[in-house]
Amino acid sequence: MSMHDDAAGSARRPWPMSRTNAALVAMCAAGALICFVFGQTVAAVALLIGAVGGGLGAVLARRGSAGDLERVNALEYADERDRVAGTKGLAAVGVVALVLGTVQLVVHAVVDTDPVSRWTAIVFYFALVISWFVANWYFVRRG
């Protein structure tokens, strides 16, 4: 691997993936471990697949032969065009998340679920709505 200079001027080895992907992979792997410990095998396997798939996708997206779709799907943007496509894709995901969060909250209101699940749905819903308002405020003012 080649060496690069960081902001401080010291030589370092480049990560095989972005810091964002490294954090996502680590969170999925840690979540999988926690789920395995608590006997939640299905959730653990889902998170483990997410960690392995996300990590592999991110590493492969950094290859020189990787296409636009591979880079955008892996959050490994190479240029401004990738960033614009990724931003639009994430905006669409945000809309779907808001709709599904609303549906989840209605289901929790209709079906008598346990308090932890219900409060998790409420917090999730308000986190999405508030982050949407804040993001809109920020980007409208920024221009």
Image (cartoon, rainbow, N blue to C red):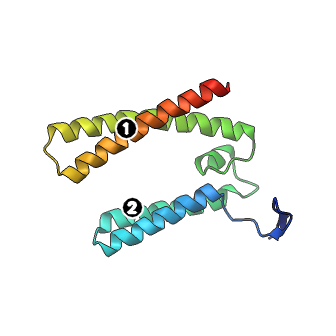
Q: Residue at x 23, y 35 (%)?
A: 106
Q: Quadrant of the N terminus?
A: bottom right
- Residue occupied by mark 1: 126
On the image, the x and y values in percent for residue 58 come to 62, 58
In the image, farthest residue toward the left: 112
User: How many numbered callouts?
Assistant: 2
Looking at the image, do the residues carrying marks 2 and 1 touch, with CB atoms under 8 Å apart?
no
- Residue type, numbered disc 1: Phe
Task: Please rate how many residues cluster around mark 1, counting C-alpha atoms within 10 Å: few if below 14, some from 14 to 19, many from 20.
Answer: some
Q: Is residue 111 visible?
A: yes
Give the Cα separation between the discs numbered 2 and 1: 25 Å
Q: Residue at x 66, y 49 (%)?
A: 71
Left of 141 or right of it: where is 115? left
Q: Residue at x 84, y 69 (%)?
A: 11
- Residue type, numbered disc 2: Ala
Left of 59 or right of it: where is 52? left
On the image, the x and y values in percent for residue 12 come to 79, 69
Where disc 2 sits, the SS reads helix
- Residue occupied by mark 2: 46
Asked if residue 55 is positioned above or below residue 122 in the image, the reply reads below
Q: Residue at x 53, y 62 (%)?
A: 25
Left of 93 or right of it: where is 23? right
Is 49 in front, or is 132? 132
Where disc 1 sits, the SS reads helix
Is 40 in front, or is 67? 40
Task: Please rate how many residues cluster around mark 2, counting C-alpha atoms within 10 Å: few if below 14, some from 14 to 19, many from 20.
Answer: some
What number is the disc on residue 48?
A: none
